[in-house]
Amino acid sequence: MADFLLDELPSTEAVLVQEHINICDKCRQRYRELKDTGKALETVRIMAPVTASPRFAENVNRAASEESRQIIAALTPERRLDWEVREAVREQRRERRYR
């Protein structure tokens, strides 16, 4: 039904689905419900971007940093060394980008 509604069926299959919808009350009702839902969704405006207040952004960044520190502290020594090497490479890339 979704492919039919999105017009993605080959024409031979689309004809068969349409014929079935024409004779089957249950499928016709389902088709109408899905079509109405699609129409309703088309009318929904895209959400406008929201800019966080400086205080909110600071609190989120602080919490994320603390959580990252806890995760890194819980790593095994071998995994922590892998992380440190990857982080050093990332830092070098950042430095090159901003030169």
Image (tube, grey):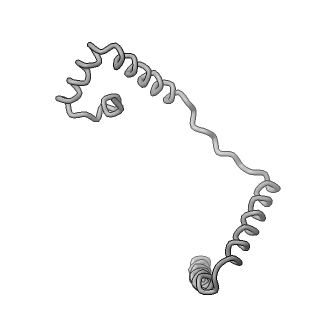
Q: Residue at x 29, y 18 (%)?
A: 21
Comparing 8 with 16, the one in front is 16
Query: Does 59 sit above or below residue 47?
Result: below
Please indicate, yes or no, whether residue 18 appears anywhere in the rendered image: yes
Q: Residue at x 80, y 56 (%)?
A: 54
In this rendering, position of residue 80 left or right of residue 15:
right
In this rendering, position of residue 72 left or right of residue 16:
right
Please indicate, yes or no, whether residue 96 appears anywhere in the rendered image: no
Q: Position of residue 43 (x, y in %)?
A: 53, 27
Task: Pick out the residue farthest to the right.
Answer: 55
Q: Residue at x 25, y 19 (%)?
A: 20
Q: Quadrant of residue 19?
A: top left
Q: Quadrant of residue 49?
A: top right
Q: Quadrant of residue 9?
A: top left
Q: Position of residue 71 (x, y in %)?
A: 68, 72
Comparing 33 with 38, the one in front is 33
